[in-house]
């Protein structure tokens, strides 16, 4: 893009919480750091009876901590933000939106439409914009659409949505966003694996015994999310997207290059290689679901709901690299701590010179990738304690982002918004990725729906039955 060209970022649903908490801060920081390739014009679109001044006042009140040491920069940015009021219910609404956006632009512009709206409005919004030429691309000018999760509710709905969108858009215009992929430590998985000859030769079933991936949340239904959550559950809210995206990066083969399609090709292969839970003869023993006590009393939750607030599963990737290695996936609400991590457990040497050779709990060698909140990497191994004898002790070498780098980590949404404007889809999900992940999730849900719903006390580590997903000598769930 020419440095003199303008990108008009249009947020549909701009009065919502996502805009003030994540999108505006990310755009502002990228503008301040001159990380966009050209000029930016930001336009909020929503139903509320606001004008530019009222929208700017709303953002000034609700966008957290943006004034900082440069209040004038924030005020100048805020004054440039524009607002369009519309209901987007009728053909005339979209015709009027096109006219207002053209008037605000005053020239040919690139466009990014961020759909910060309910899932059932995605398709009508794209249809309306497509009908009135807002998504046309010509003469080097682009038009892109960012779609928030959830992308569908199952394989059937996700496939139908993909088909409908791709009848109006090219794949390179659709940016299916998962904010976890914008986290620095998630991106670092690729660099850690494929830049370091120390680790890549060990990254296979010959040396790795288990892989744990955890997304733990210490909150419940704060913010009135009970109604939404009860229709989704932990499986659709976290496992289908965040957990499986992390798994695909941990397990994928080296891509031919870091180009978007090369990286996504390898991720898709992993997801397609996940053994469907229904195909395992003991499938019911590979998944545990739970509800925290008090969930049924939350506002918006069906008193007879069986929606899971906790789910743990044991999965396998049936390919040459990972055959036989269990991947233990876990997510839950009202757990004691909030963290996301990947724990790679290495096998023991074939003969033990130190300690009992059959000691199931002797597992000193592991790598922990800390994705949040304290981003970093830990390497565990054993050393001999000083003194007589051969007493061993587990020690840790650790790398911490905050301690090593002076500059703060870039927020996920900022990085992803920069990539949308730059046309880089590496950190976005392709249509076949979505469908492959839903295929596995649907199979797991079929198995899970025939299992018991365990209850667990808030601020505990979920149902005790989840520990049975490990074989006798594979350890237990990590508890950072």
Image (cartoon, rainbow, N blue to C red):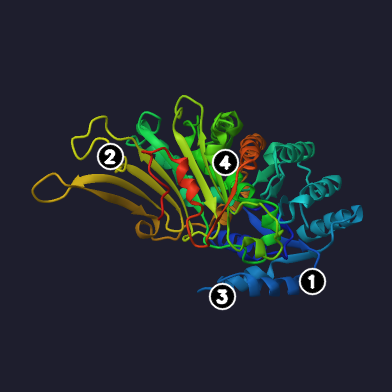
- Checking the image for residue 71, the label placed there is 3
Is residue 308 in view from this perspective? yes
* Residue 403 vertical placement versus 155 (above, below): below
77 relative position to 366: left or right: right
Whole-angstrom CA distance, mark 2 to mark 3, is 60 Å
In which image quadrant can residue 89 be found?
bottom right
Q: Are marks 1 and 4 in contact (CB under 8 Å)?
A: no
- In this figure, which residue is indicated by the disc labeled 2? 359
Is 458 in front, or is 322?
Answer: 458
Q: CA distance from mark 1 to mark 4?
A: 36 Å
User: Which residue is rendered at x = 65% and y = 53% of the image?
Assistant: 4
Label 2 secondary element? loop
Q: Nearer the viewer, residue 415 or 452?
A: 452
Pair 3/4: label in front: 4
Q: Residue at x 79, y 52 (%)?
A: 121
Q: Which residue is mark 1?
A: 50
Classify mark 3: helix, strand or loop.
helix
Q: Which mark is residue 337?
A: none
Image coordinates for residue 457, horizontal then vertical, percent: 52, 61
Q: Which mark's residue is nearer the viewer, 4 or 2?
A: 2
Circle nearer the N terminus (1, 4): 1
Give the residue at mark 4: 426
Circle 1 — which element?
Answer: loop
Please indicate whether residue 274 sits to the left or right of residue 336 in the image: right
Which of 441 and 436 lies nearest the eye of the viewer? 441
Q: Secondary structure at mark 4?
A: loop
């Amino acid at each position: 893009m020419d440095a003199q060209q303008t990108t008009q970022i249009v947020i549909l649903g701009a009065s919502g919480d996502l805009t003030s908490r994540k999108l505006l801060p990310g755009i502002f920081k990228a503008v301040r750091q001159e990380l966009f390739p050209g000029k930016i014009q930001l336009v909020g679109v929503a139903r509320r009876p606001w004008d530019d001044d009222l929208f700017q006042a709303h953002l000034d009140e609700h966008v957290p901590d943006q004034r900082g040491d440069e209040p004038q920069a924030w005020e100048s940015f805020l004054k440039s933000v524009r607002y369009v009021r519309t209901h987007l219910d009728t053909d005339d609404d979209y015709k009027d939106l096109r006219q207002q956006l053209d008037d605000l632009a005053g020239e040919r512009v690139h466009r990014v439409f961020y759909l910060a709206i309910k899932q059932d409005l995605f398709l009508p919004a794209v249809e309306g914009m497509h009908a009135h030429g807002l998504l046309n691309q010509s003469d080097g000018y682009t038009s892109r659409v960012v779609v928030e999760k959830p992308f569908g509710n199952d394989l059937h709905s996700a496939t139908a949505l993909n088909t409908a969108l791709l009848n109006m858009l090219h794949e390179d215009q659709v940016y299916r966003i998962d904010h976890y992929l914008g986290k620095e430590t998630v991106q670092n998985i690729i660099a850690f694996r494929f830049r370091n000859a120390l680790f890549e030769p060990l990254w296979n079933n010959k040396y790795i015994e288990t892989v744990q991936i955890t997304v733990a949340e210490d909150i419940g239904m704060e913010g009135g999310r009970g109604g939404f959550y009860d229709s989704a559950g932990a499986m659709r809210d976290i496992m289908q997207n965040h957990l499986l995206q992390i798994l695909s990066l941990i397990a994928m083969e080296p891509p031919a290059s870091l180009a978007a399609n090369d990286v996504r090709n390898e991720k898709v292969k992993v997801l397609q290689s996940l053994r469907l839970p229904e195909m395992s003869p003991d499938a019911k023993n590979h998944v545990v679901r739970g509800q925290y006590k008090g969930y049924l009393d939350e506002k918006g939750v069906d008193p007879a709901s069986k929606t899971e607030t906790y789910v743990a599963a044991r999965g396998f990737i049936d390919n040459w690299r990972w055959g036989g290695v269990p991947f233990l996936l876990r997510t839950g609400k009202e757990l004691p701590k909030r963290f996301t991590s990947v724990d790679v457990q290495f096998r023991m040497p074939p003969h033990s010179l130190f300690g009992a050779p059959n000691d199931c709990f002797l597992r000193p060698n592991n790598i922990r990738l800390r994705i949040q909140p304290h981003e970093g990497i830990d390497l565990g191994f054993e050393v001999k304690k000083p003194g007589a004898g051969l007493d061993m002790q587990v020690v840790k070498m650790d790398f911490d982002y905050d301690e090593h780098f002076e500059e703060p980590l870039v927020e996920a949404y900022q990085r992803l918004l920069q990539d949308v404007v730059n046309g880089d889809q590496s950190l976005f999900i392709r249509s076949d990725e979505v469908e492959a992940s839903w295929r596995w999730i649907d199979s797991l849900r079929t198995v899970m729906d025939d299992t018991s719903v365990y209850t667990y006390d808030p601020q505990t580590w979920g149902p005790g039955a989840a520990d049975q997903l490990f074989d006798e000598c594979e350890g237990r769930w990590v508890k950072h």
